[in-house]
Image (cartoon, rainbow, N blue to C red):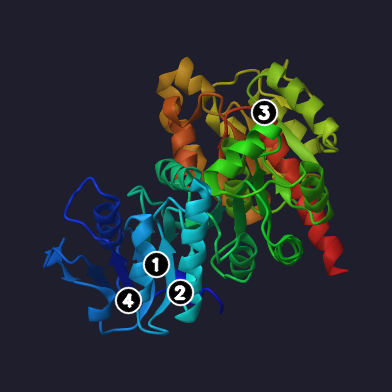
Amino acid sequence: MFLEALFSPKTVCVVGASRNADSWGHVILKNLINSGYAGSIFAVNPNADSILGVKCHRSLRDVEAPIDLAIIVVPAKLVPCVLSEAKPNMIKYAVVISAGFREAGAEGRQLEKEMIEIARRNGTRIVGPNCMGLYNSYNGLGATFTSLLPREGGVSFISQSGAVGTTMLAWAKIEGIGFSKFISLGNESDISLHEALRFLADDDSTKVIAIYMESVKDGRQLVEAFRYSSERKPVIVMKVGITSAGAKAAESHTGALAVEDSLIDGIFRQFCIIRAKDPDELFHLATSFAELPMPKGRSAVVVSTGGGWAVECSDLAEMEGIALPPLPEIVSSIADRRLPRYWSKKNPIDMVATPDPEAYYEILEAALCQGTYDFAFLIGYGTIGSIAMPFITDKEVEMTQRVLRLIERTEKPVYIVDFLGPSRSESARAFMKLGLPVYINVSSAVRVASEMIRYNEYRKKMRK
């Protein structure tokens, strides 16, 4: 499959590997070693015999083995010279980390053109330049700047900003969210967004594709790639550069030109590409699509610690076309038995701050095991233990595993809202360790549920 050797190389060569711990050539080689990559690693540095235990070659000419992936970390002006040292068809893919090409002006544009001409003569495809590498969690290919690399999972991320991309990797590591693959595209002098998108659409370990997007190259091919990909798996995009100021910033960033945002928005709507407004939303949408089952319909039950949140959820649900059907008799009878007599007596269920985690679970289980509801919102769970009654925290945490098993058994998602978040709530941390997304406000949870419903309806329509 095209790009297979890029993400699953048998041999990797770091050109510009350095003994200086403060250099990117050192950092990338170290990350590649520490991330568990099991293939052959070569290094090129004319002034060193070995770095971090890896033998150094004076130039690419001295590397006798064919190279699936070269990571080039030398000054921009030296990149064409480095590539010209390689024998024809010696290097399948080269990731050019170096900056100072098209984004730097006329001289840089000429340098980039020269680089591409040499690469094409030698049969090498280029990622970058001006990028931050790539990552494959399933084979330990940590050829990137950050050492904070997430566990195996279903999210793959394409970024036109290296800084945004590596920050998302670190964020996923800290939050315990699983990633499959990551690629920083940089200037897209050769390999473009549409090629990476099509590859990930056919990649079995990728459940959802997240994209940070500044500009468009090869517009028709990108539109076709969006269509192709969205029919196979969810595609979530944070598109920036939508104002004149943002477009100018994008041009100076990667040397790319922006496209009228209304055109992009129309394409997204046509193919049910989900649009995220910021990195936080991109992250939550992607992880939710990857970790939760898809809602099969639009009917929800709301189980809320307090009445105010229940009212907010009701408003937002109606705005998004989500129905809140009346409670089945069995759910009402359990609530009558487990809750104070002044509970809400309807959906949404106001738990009236009941300090009993078992009651939350029993009511949630009864509701989801009925045919009435397609999914649930669990709002404020864990809040009581965190802010008022720490002695129930252990019980709240224990219930998180039962909620996960309930989701797996019923194949119905539960959108969990914990206003304190993982920094202050032990139950939030417990949910996230189990791979379940946690939202810190009701609007985020409802938004995610709405987008998952919309995408599932789109997929059903495409299959007809």
Label 4 neighbourhood size at 10 Å, few (<14), some (14-19), many (20+)? some
Q: CA distance from mark 2 to mark 4?
A: 10 Å
Q: Are marks 4 and 1 in contact (CB under 8 Å)?
A: no
Q: Is residue 234 left or right of residue 199?
A: right
In primary-sequence order, the first of circles 2 and 1 is: 1
Q: Secondary structure at mark 3?
A: helix
Closer to the eye: label 3 or 2 = 2
**Residue at screen point 32% across, 76% down:** 85
**Residue at screen point 45% across, 74% down:** 118
Q: Are marks 2 and 1 in contact (CB under 8 Å)?
A: yes
Residue bearing mark 2? 118
Q: CA distance from mark 3 to mark 2?
A: 54 Å
Q: Quadrant of the N terminus?
A: bottom right
Q: Is residue 453 left or right of residue 174?
A: right
Using the image, tell me which numbered label, if any, was put on residue 442: 3
Q: Amino acid at mark 1?
A: Pro
Q: Are marks 3 and 2 in contact (CB under 8 Å)?
A: no
Q: Amino acid at mark 2?
A: Ile
In primary-sequence order, the first of circles 4 and 1 is: 1
Compared to residue 428, the image places residue 79 above or below, namely below
Q: Secondary structure at mark 2?
A: helix
Please state the horizontal and vertical placement of residue 284, each as a whole percent of the image. 59, 41
Quarter of the image holding residue 302? Answer: top right
**Residue at screen point 61% across, 67% down:** 195
Residue bearing mark 4? 85
Residue bearing mark 1? 80
Please name whichever residue, 178 or 391, is drawn nearer the observer in this view of the structure: 178
**Residue at screen point 28% across, 75% down:** 60
In primary-sequence order, the first of circles 3 and 2 is: 2
Q: Are marks 4 and 3 in contact (CB under 8 Å)?
A: no
